[in-house]
Image: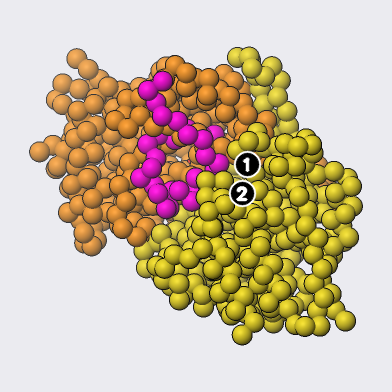
Chain colours: A yellow, B orange
Amino acid sequence: SRSINLAVIPGDGIGQEVVAQGLKVLSAVLPQDVKLETREFDFGARRYRATGETLTDADLDALKKHDAILLGAIGDPSVPSGVLERGFLLKLRFAFDHHVNLRPSRLLPGVATPLAGQPAIDFVVVREGTEGPYTGNGGTIRQGTPHAVATEVSLNTAFGIERVVRDAYARAQARPRKKLALVHKNNVLVHAGHLWTDIFNKVGEEFPDVTTEYMHVDAATIYLVTQPERFDVIVTDNLFGDIITDLAAAVSGGIGVAASGNINPAGEYPSMFEPVHGSAPDIAGQGKADPSATVLSVALLLRHLGYESEAARIEDAVTADLAERGTTTRTTDEIGDALAVRVAG
Amino acid sequence: SRSINLAVIPGDGIGQEVVAQGLKVLSAVLPQDVKLETREFDFGARRYRATGETLTDADLDALKKHDAILLGAIGDPSVPSGVLERGFLLKLRFAFDHHVNLRPSRLLPGVATPLAGQPAIDFVVVREGTEGPYTGNGGTIRQGTPHAVATEVSLNTAFGIERVVRDAYARAQARPRKKLALVHKNNVLVHAGHLWTDIFNKVGEEFPDVTTEYMHVDAATIYLVTQPERFDVIVTDNLFGDIITDLAAAVSGGIGVAASGNINPAGEYPSMFEPVHGSAPDIAGQGKADPSATVLSVALLLRHLGYESEAARIEDAVTADLAERGTTTRTTDEIGDALAVRVAG
Ligand SMILES: CC(C)[C@H](C(=O)O)[C@@H](O)C(=O)O
Ligand SMILES: CC(C)[C@H](C(=O)O)[C@@H](O)C(=O)O
């Protein structure tokens, strides 16, 4: 009999509320014969304030025993900026080699967008997750003096670029339009940019049916608001991916519906699925958070584990729910309930 | 009697066409008693292909003798990516210490925006122009092998941050809303991010009447499409500024109307004014380019040189022209003529 052994990290702020709905929908969608086991981990601001710990080696060992991880959100104003981001979120992505950070953007029918018209948005960003300016490399001298100097070093390897570029080509090849765009800034960041571009072109020879283009990151932000329908698959570095996926989420219905996966494709470590939004402390505990992004992250999780039809059922349920929702305001719990009913039905 | 000694760099592609209109409007707006002297410099792809040179020491000496520089656009597909950008554009910004890269965004009446509604957009981005990931610092080892590693180093100094932050505070203080946002990514780029944040907060003590906020660059892209009216002045690093000003241009009428100044506030070197758009080789030589961004850059140039009423006349003329233009298509030349008539009238 089949089973899913899931690590659950509700985290901070609205993380708690949205993860509860994600689990509700997950339970409802799974066939009877799949045994779902969950273990909850109390990571985030509360634990940091209590113990000073963000993510220990023992934590990583415990997490490693699971098939996948579902995360709500991490971050709280009581903790200095960077401590939980670097000490937990990024530490986990790096420790578990989550090099494919998958962020699909679809503008679903009936969903409000800040863009005029209702452009046909349906693309996925493959963001590199373990390199670039995210490695923490850098430092500061003479801090607090007029002579301070701070550096940030972006690290880029052929190994790291090639594997994520290859993943993106394969995803593009599997989609009807078979288009792949490399987004970088190779006219300024020439060292990293040329390495990315060279590898992008070289790997492309293995995928002759994929149409490619190169775009500077600044130009990409323009196209994301003027012609978002032109994109199919985008591959990009860690920082550019961070920036353009928030913009992509904003134009395709907002971060209330933006899902993401931090994927280790070979399965050496459990992959982690999380909404793109943060912990939103300003609305936490009020039942106002939209759990759709978390529920869609559960769909990505199921697809990653091979439950394709269940993943599709969740996506259809969210699509239908959003189309029906209109301007009615429902609580986090009500939306979760409605989605659970739909996926079970 | 007064005089303006202007260096003119038409550059590549549509640069030639739009600069001609900028000069036409400049001549038309200047009072009789101001003597305008221009010297044209043939920098860009043509010269690079002919001589292999982008910008020599002698060029810099010649440029230095002017009160200001008007640039069209630099860049051509015949030149490898990065050569002219690094070898000319960035070299000039660095050599002339253009540390205040000023990029105003205003959605003028009647101008199309990809955003639904007609949000009241009126903000200015103060982008640092001489530091960050733009210094060219970095390198590649084992290029072309599976073991290649490429780095990019972002350099940030208290000196460089403080002067641009102070400039931004002063600009915010001079505006009715007196708001200043720092945009960075201080939860990930902690070294540079904390230096920026500390200095931003410290300098803020001298400007108690300016309301400040901090925003991550990814969140800023969301607000730029969902609530662009919230921004008044933004100060940010070189790369983040590059990215968000293209997005800002896109939401406030497109890069056809986005002007910019590369400013050395103390006047040690001539400042340079240029449209945000590039050389657009696909439409070059067809009279299709909108010269408005260049003409608005001329207004920034005049304001920088102390010709405030002339700058305002140009801005009013462009505003009126855009409002009247509607869907009629006019050539580059026709738009330039219409603007010249307006500013003279
Ligand atoms: C919280 C932060 C570290 C994170 C990132 O920059 O990757 C977030 O913005 C995201 O996109 O998942
Ligand atoms: C062409 C390029 C070097 C330049 C930059 O990145 O600064 C351009 O994008 C700009 O914004 O002026």
Hey, which quadrant is residue A6 in on the image? bottom right
Q: What quarter of the picture does the C terminus of chain B occupy? A: top left
Q: Residue at x 25, y 20 (%)?
A: B3
Residue A115 horizontal/vertical position (percent): 40, 61
Q: What amino acid is at disc 1?
A: Asp
Are the residues tagged 2 and 1 within 8 Å (C-beta)?
yes
> Which of the numbered marks, if any, corresponds to residue B106?
none
Circle 2 marks a residue in which chain?
A
Image: B55 above or below A87 = above
Would you say residue A219 is visible in this rendering?
A: no
> Which of the numbered marks, if any, corresponds to residue A76?
1
Q: What amino acid is at disc 2?
A: Gly
In the foreground, B15 or B278:
B278
Residue A206 horizontal/vertical position (percent): 75, 70
Residue B79 horizontal/vertical position (percent): 56, 49
Element type where label 2 sits in the image: loop
Report the span colored magenta.
B208-237
Image: A345 above or below A4 = below
Q: Which residue is mark 2?
A: A13
Magenta-drawn stretch contains B227: yes
